[in-house]
């Protein structure tokens, strides 16, 4: 065994001892919220496909038509020859949907965050970030070389203290938060964050990957994301998100002013040096946004299913289609997930470092495809585990 293999083997051994070694499991997802593993059909309650759009006939057809019209791939980066017409159409649609002047589409949400943040702040600047932001926001912050200061999760008082004592030492500052936190399912206090950003000359950026399409119905019932959960809508100059959760496709985006978007398109390395998104993914996202705007009743279903589940177990009403059940211990969490799989439910156990030490959990997600009777059967199965449901985050 050479030194590289020896290094990897030792690391894996230590992770295995802590219950933190990860293994990929081949999963065949299908319609109606179902998935197949090892020849068994399971009801999946762990997918981010909240609207079941990966299986929607009209969206699949749009992707097929785009392949026929434009080919299987984009062929190059957007600044070379990969900027096919569908991308510009999607950017126009996203900007209108989010209420901004312009938008920029990236190849993934992770690529968006590691491109946007280093464009706007750098060495000598500061970022104030919620302690539970997504890993891609942390990665983008570290790549920027700006000072990174974490504030306690959703704690406006703590953030205000930090701003009062530290903001003046830096020329430029950002505030980063998820709109809907992916592991806890709760909303960020966006009006308060927007007010602090305004008062202290910070640029507020939200990652709305888990909000767009499923939370925040506006006056027309359209679920535009976390910002429209509040009235009046808070001012958020940098609205980032993904096309891979409720949208059912793949990619990321930033919605902002035209000046900011022009600058991002000129300088974001993860845009400039990456092959553009394939036409099928962009066409699928366009069709998904059309359905979100024209069928609000359908898009209300994930929240309805999540509320049905929490009501059945006497839990607080959810703020999103994500409902975590905190177990704490990693081994117990994975054992509970295995017991649920034995009963026909696919529920993922989430372990550190994805979540903080001591907060391993069952993370449940609800889809428009789930039947009410299956949601209630899941609630009974959870009750049968003997969990202390007071530990829900």
Image (cartoon, rainbow, N blue to C red):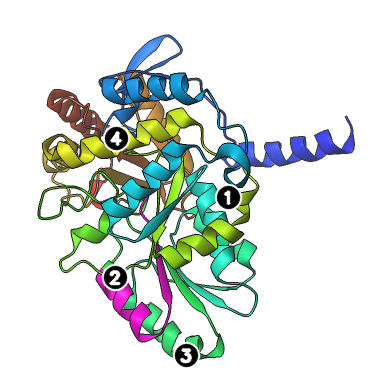
Instruction: Please name whichever residue, 222 or 318, is drawn nearer the observer in this view of the structure.
Output: 222
| Label 1 with label 2: CB-CB less than 8 Å | no
Q: Position of residue 68 (x, y in %)?
A: 45, 18
- Counting residues from the N terminus, which is met first, the one under dot 4 or under dot 2? 2
Residue 362 located within the stretch drawn in magenta: no
Secondary structure beneath disc 4? helix
Disc 2: which residue: 235
Which contiguous range is marked in magenta?
Answer: 191-210
- Counting residues from the N terminus, which is met first, the one under dot 3 or under dot 2? 3
- Counting residues from the N terminus, which is met first, the one under dot 3 or under dot 1? 3
Pointer 1 local density, CA inside 10 Å: few below 14, some 14–19, many at least 20: many
Between marks 4 and 3 in the image, the one whose residue lies nearer the viewer: 4
Secondary structure beneath disc 2? loop
Disc 3: which residue: 165
Disc 4: which residue: 288
Q: Name the residue furthest right.
A: 2
- Separation (CA) of disc 1 from disc 4: 23 Å
Q: Quadrant of the N terminus?
A: top right
User: Quadrant of the rendered structure where residue 227 is?
Assistant: bottom left
Q: Which mark is residue 271?
A: 1
- Separation (CA) of disc 3 from disc 2: 24 Å
Q: Is residue 259 above or below residue 89?
A: below
Instruction: Please name whichever residue, 74 or 382, is drawn nearer the observer in this view of the structure.
Output: 74
């Amino acid at each position: 065994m050479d030194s590289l293999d020896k290094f990897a083997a030792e690391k894996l051994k230590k992770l295995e001892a802590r219950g933190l070694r990860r293994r990929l499991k081949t999963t065949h997802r299908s319609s109606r919220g179902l998935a197949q593993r090892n020849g068994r059909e399971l009801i999946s309650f762990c997918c981010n496909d909240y609207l079941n759009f990966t299986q929607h006939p009209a969206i699949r057809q749009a992707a097929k038509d785009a392949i026929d019209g434009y080919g299987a791939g984009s062929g190059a980066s957007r600044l070379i020859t990969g900027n096919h017409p569908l991308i510009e159409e999607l950017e126009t649609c996203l900007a209108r949907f989010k209420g901004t002047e312009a938008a920029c589409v990236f190849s993934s949400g992770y690529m968006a965050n590691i491109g946007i943040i280093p464009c706007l702040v750098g060495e000598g600047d500061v970022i104030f970030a919620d302690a539970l932001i997504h890993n891609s926001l942390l990665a983008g912050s570290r790549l920027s070389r700006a000072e990174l200061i974490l504030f306690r999760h959703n704690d406006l008082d703590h953030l205000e203290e930090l701003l009062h004592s530290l903001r003046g030492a830096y020329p430029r500052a950002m505030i980063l938060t998820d709109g809907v936190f992916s592991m806890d399912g709760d909303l960020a206090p966006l009006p308060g964050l927007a007010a602090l950003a305004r008062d202290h000359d910070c640029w507020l950026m939200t990652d709305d990957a888990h909000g767009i399409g499923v939370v925040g119905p506006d006056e027309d019932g359209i679920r535009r994301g976390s910002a429209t959960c509040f009235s009046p809508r808070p001012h958020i100059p940098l609205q980032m998100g993904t096309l891979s959760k409720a949208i059912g496709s793949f990619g990321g985006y930033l919605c902002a002013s035209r000046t900011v978007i022009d600058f991002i398109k000129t300088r974001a390395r993860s845009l400039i040096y990456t092959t553009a998104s394939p036409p099928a993914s962009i066409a699928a996202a366009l069709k998904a946004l059309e359905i979100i705007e024209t069928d609000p009743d359908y898009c209300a279903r994930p929240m309805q299913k999540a509320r049905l589940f929490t009501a059945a177990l006497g839990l607080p009403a959810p703020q999103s289609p994500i409902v975590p059940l905190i177990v704490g211990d990693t081994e117990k969490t994975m054992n509970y997930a295995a017991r649920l799989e034995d009963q026909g439910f696919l529920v993922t156990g989430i372990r550190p470092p994805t979540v903080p030490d001591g907060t391993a959990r069952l993370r449940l997600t609800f889809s428009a495809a789930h039947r009410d009777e299956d949601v209630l059967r899941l609630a009974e199965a959870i009750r049968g585990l003997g969990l202390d449901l007071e530990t829900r985050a």
